[in-house]
Image: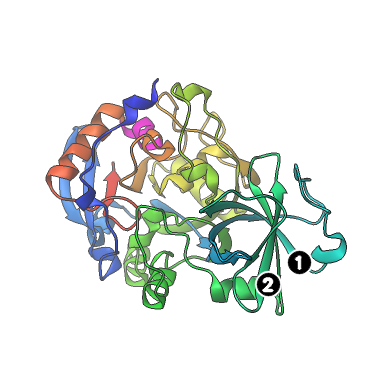
Amino acid sequence: MNLRDFDYHLPRRLIAQEPVLIRDRSRLMVVNRRAGSFEHRLFADLPEYLQPDDALVINETKVLPARLIGKKESGGKVEILLVRKMKPGETPVTAGEGLRGKRYEGSSAWECLVKNSGKLRPPTSIFFSEEVEGELVGKTPAGLWKLFLKGKEEIDRKIQQIGFPPLPPYIHRNGDQGARAMDLERYQTVYARQEGAIAAPTAGLHFTATLLKDIKKKRIAVLPLTLHVGVGTFLPVKEEEIEKYRLAGEFFEVPRETASAVNEARASGKKVMAVGTTVSRALESCAGENGKIESKSGETDLFIVPGHRFRVVDVLVTNFHLPRSTLLMLVSAFAGRELILAAYEEAIRENYRFYSYGDAMLIL
């Protein structure tokens, strides 16, 4: 398959810049795979498509305020996206580290992406506030920058205070604190518990506490797992032949209770509804040939493309995804590329809102 097979044109006006006022008032396109039909509803109608003893699986990952804005000693602006906190002594860098002796004692090391107006030569000092400074010391073998952060207080607490939500680049912000406060709340699911993601599992952004209560009242199990969204989810695919592409690994954990409840639902002929592509990848990563899943934690680099046989997921809730993205490939694997592209054309005609803060799709 070729990358261009997953392309489409989206009018810029349909890229949602802000979420709807009430989470579950977003629109919901219902795609029926068997009938090849589309239905237009609201997300609040989701419980109508679930039956007692079905399983609804959610991703409890919590988004870090991982976008830091700082300045170099020259005054030039630098934007940092924290990707992963490194363990002590982990992975050397290709250049620069060790030039400052004990300067890094008491600091934390991060893999990060850097957006900079000029060329960076390690080591480069960056100042994020009067109390937090950092130093870029070189590249890791994976091609990411290694950043040491140091502050007057515990650095993780300071990141919470000065960091911005890591919104994707198609959502435009001018850095004002009002928008930051709104995004800190809304670019996060209401059930986020386990901190570690650098992007939101956006299919879950539409749920409210009330909607979840209504679902549970129907005797539907709401089952948590964790997959920390990392660069593997959102980096662009650069291989024209997608079979050659390799997805970066992301940490996931499927608890024993969730695995047991999913297996019980499947054994009794009930449906498993995955809330998002991250949940789908986590479930499919620990499934046997018979569809039974095991409790598991670790990294998954599972890249789901058309031709993949889904062993666990029966129904999928998802957002509308960027062209040529691994996420669009996954939903195409679930419903068929032609049907998904036809659904996207329908959504554009009907003026659905696209991407992270946009509307949702339910694939039956």
Q: How many numbered discs? A: 2
Compared across the picture, whether 4 is left or right of 28 comes to right
Label 2: which secondary element: helix
Using the image, determine if residue 288 lies above or below residue 123: above
- The CA span between labels 1 and 2 is 8 Å
The colour scheme used here is rainbow
Classified by dominant secondary structure, the portion drawn in magenta counts as helix
Q: Quadrant of the N terminus?
A: top left
Identify which residue is drawn at 40% across, 53% down. 169
Q: Are marks 1 and 2 in contact (CB under 8 Å)?
A: yes
Q: Position of residue 66 (x, y in %)?
A: 55, 62
The quadrant holding residue 208 is bottom left
Disc 1 marks a residue whose amino acid type is Ser
Identify which residue is drawn at 39% across, 41% down. 269
Residue 361 is marked as: none
Residue bounds of the magenta highlight: 330-335
Identify which residue is drawn at 33% across, 72% down. 210
Q: Position of residue 238 (x, y in %)?
A: 47, 30
Label 1: which secondary element: loop
Out of 94 and 209, give the one closest to the viewer: 94
Residue 107 is marked as: 1
- Does the image show residue 40? yes
Compared across the picture, whether 347 is left or right of 313 comes to left
Residue that label 2 marks: 155
Q: In the orientation shown, which residue stands out farthest toward the left?
A: 349
Compared across the picture, whether 141 is left or right of 283 comes to right
Disc 2 marks a residue whose amino acid type is Ile
Q: In the orientation shown, which residue stands out farthest toward the right?
A: 101
